[in-house]
Image: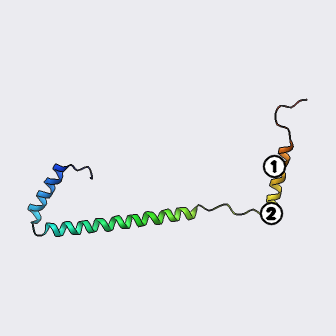
């Protein structure tokens, strides 16, 4: 958890208990927990929205006009008729 070991965590809690006091520490911890939960929720929502926009940005190429599609098919069939391999000549 954040690269903090158990010993460091206990030291931080002990210092917090001394500085803030036993009455305010639970209230502060509760508000900190709520703030972190709200931050996580907001970041998850933002990440989801970015992914949705990225998916919408990936659009298919526009459909071709019928005459363009026919000319491409004709060029494909012309190249298919030609023999492949070495020229015998």
* Mark 2 lies on residue: 66
Quadrant assignment, res 84: top right
Residue 48: image tag: none
- The secondary structure type at the circle numbered 1 is helix
Q: Position of residue 49 (x, y in %)?
A: 47, 66
* Mark 1 lies on residue: 76
Residue at 27% x, 52% y: name it: 2
Quadrant assignment, res 23: bottom left
Q: Position of residue 78 (x, y in %)?
A: 86, 47
- The secondary structure type at the circle numbered 2 is helix
Neighbour class for label 2 at 10 Å: few (<14), some, many (≥20)?
few
Q: Is residue 5 above or below residue 20?
A: above
Neighbour class for label 1 at 10 Å: few (<14), some, many (≥20)?
few
Residue at 83% x, 31% y: name it: 86
Q: Rounded to the nearest whole Å, what is the CA distance between mark 1 and mark 2?
A: 15 Å
Q: Are marks 1 and 2 in contact (CB under 8 Å)?
A: no
Give left or right: position of 4 versus 18: right
Give left or right: position of 18 versus 58: left
Q: Residue furthest top?
A: 89
Q: Position of residue 33 (x, y in %)?
A: 25, 66
Image color mode: rainbow
Quadrant assignment, res 70: bottom right
Q: Quadrant of the C terminus?
A: top right
Residue at 11% x, 57% y: name it: 14
Q: Is residue 16 above or below residue 31?
A: above
């Amino acid at each position: 958890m954040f690269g903090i070991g158990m010993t460091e965590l206990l030291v931080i809690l002990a210092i917090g208990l001394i500085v803030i006091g036993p009455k305010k520490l639970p209230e502060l911890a509760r508000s900190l927990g709520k703030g972190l939960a709200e931050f996580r929720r907001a970041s998850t929502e933002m990440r989801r929205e970015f992914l949705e926009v990225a998916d919408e940005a990936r659009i298919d190429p526009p459909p071709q006009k019928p005459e363009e599609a026919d000319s491409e098919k004709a060029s494909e069939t012309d190249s298919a008729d030609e023999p492949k391999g070495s020229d015998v000549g």
